[in-house]
Image (cartoon, rainbow, N blue to C red):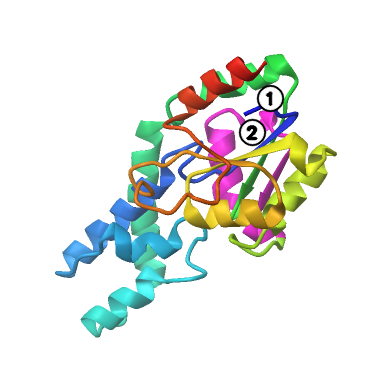
Amino acid sequence: MRKPRGIIFDFDGVLVDTEWAIYQSWVHLYAREGQEISIATYSPCLGAGYSHWDPAAHLEKLTGKTYDWDVETPARQSMLEADLERMGLMPGALELLDWCQTQGIALTVASSSSRRWVQGWLEKLGIYARFAGVFTRTDGYPVKPDPALFLAAQRCMGLNREECLIIEDSENGTIAARNAGIPCVAIPNRMTAGCDFSRAAFRADSLAALLESLKSAC
């Protein structure tokens, strides 16, 4: 690994452990209805949102019920946001961001989630201003594994693809990175540990481990 001039961060599961909190909110809802949802069943949502598979529609199919999602969704959202506020940033995230700032490395975020979700949390956690650009599905980009989000982030930094590094936690994200032609480091978490990361150029156990690798590359 060599020192990049720009880093493109995925958001969910990379900067904040949102994937776990979101999944747990569905686990609780399914359990209330006498159903179960495994990580393997939920996995199409990782790195892509609900564009490829919808847990709400799946629950209705399992139970034969129609739910008032205008009521259920805000309740589920309130639960997961309370969990996220307690958790804060992923371990090592702030140290990596600080080091990038000292090194003059440009930073962007590219996420299949909505701008309201991503920017809202970046602002709440006090790191939004650190990024030169934030690119989300509700800005008009197709979700991963389409490479459009990453290519927009790369263009924003004014760098060549080989000068950038993508940090991802999902299989869909690593596929999108390969499709974009941008080197990618995969950092699996408790939601994505079983995914296929063979498309990533590198793999790290954590953001802290990635930081040490980047320092060694200087």
Residue 35's spot in the image, x, y percent? 18, 69
Residue 3: assigned label: 1
Q: Residue at x 42, y 26 (%)?
A: 91
Q: Secondary structure at mark 2?
A: helix
Tag 2 residue: 128
SS assignment for the magenta stretch, majority: helix
Mark nearer the viewer, 2 or 1: 1
The answer to whether residue 174 of the structure is visible from this angle is yes
Query: Which is nearer the eye, 105 or 205?
Result: 205
Q: Residue at x 68, y 30 (%)?
A: 129
**Which image quarter holds the C terminus?**
top right
Residue 171's spot in the image, x, y percent? 48, 54
Which quadrant of the figure has residue 215? top right
Q: Is residue 51 left or right of residue 157?
A: left
Q: Look at the image and give the residue range highlighted in magenta.
A: 116-139
Q: Secondary structure at mark 1?
A: loop
Q: Would residue 121 be counted in the magenta stretch?
A: yes
